Image (cartoon, rainbow, N blue to C red):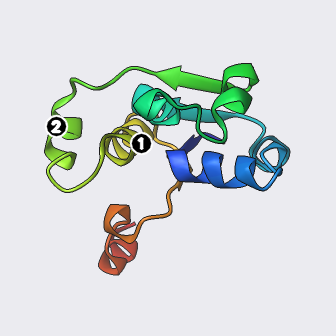
Amino acid sequence: MIVVSNTSPLTNLAAIGHFQLLRDVYAKLQIPNAVWEELNAGGQRWPGREEVAAADWITRHALADEPLVTALKADLDAGEAESIALAMRLEAALLLLDRLPARPPPEWDRLA
């Protein structure tokens, strides 16, 4: 199963000492480079940064220049935009997000 994660699930679980739950539940994660950049934003090392750097079960992907990412950035931050684009590219089974504006509207459930 392909699972893509945005930044917040990584930082939130790392901050409370439960980052390993992601590996226990999903085995592998895919993240876009924008998520990695957010973990290093402002010259800080945000919670989850060290864990992601050491995790051989997390794969980073470059896709910042894709047209979909550019379009999504009109309403979302780079991590959310790239996470959505990556999930679509990989045909992921799950996309881990926390912000309501990044989630698809409920009526999309009927299209699946």
Of helix, strand and loop, which one carries label 2?
helix
Residue 67: name its quadrant: top left
Residue 104: name its quadrant: bottom left
Horizontal relation, residue 42 to residue 31: left or right:
left
State whether residue 62 is above or below residue 84.
above
Horizontal relation, residue 23 to residue 98: left or right:
right
Residue 59, given in percent of the width and then of the height, sits at: 60, 23
Of helix, strand and loop, which one carries label 1?
helix
Q: Is the Cβ of the residue at disc 2 closer than 8 Å to that at disc 1? A: no
Residue 110, given in percent of the width and then of the height, sits at: 36, 77
The amino acid pointed to by label 1 is Ser
Identify the residue shown where x is 50% and y is 57%.
Answer: 97
State whether residue 76 is above or below residue 46.
below
Horizontal relation, residue 15 to residue 4: left or right:
right
Q: Quadrant of the C terminus?
A: bottom left
- Earlier along the polypeptide chain: callout 2 or callout 1? 2
Q: Nearer the viewer, residue 10 or 44?
A: 44
Mark 1 = which residue? Answer: 83
Number of marks present in the image shown? 2
> What distance separates the C-alpha of mark 2 from that of mark 1?
12 Å
Q: Quadrant of the N terminus?
A: top right
Question: Which label number is shown at residue 70?
Answer: 2
The amino acid pointed to by label 2 is Thr
Identify the residue shown where x is 42% and y is 65%.
Answer: 99
Q: Residues within 10 Å of mark 2 (few under 14, many from 20)?
A: some
Identify the residue shown where x is 43% and y is 26%.
Answer: 33
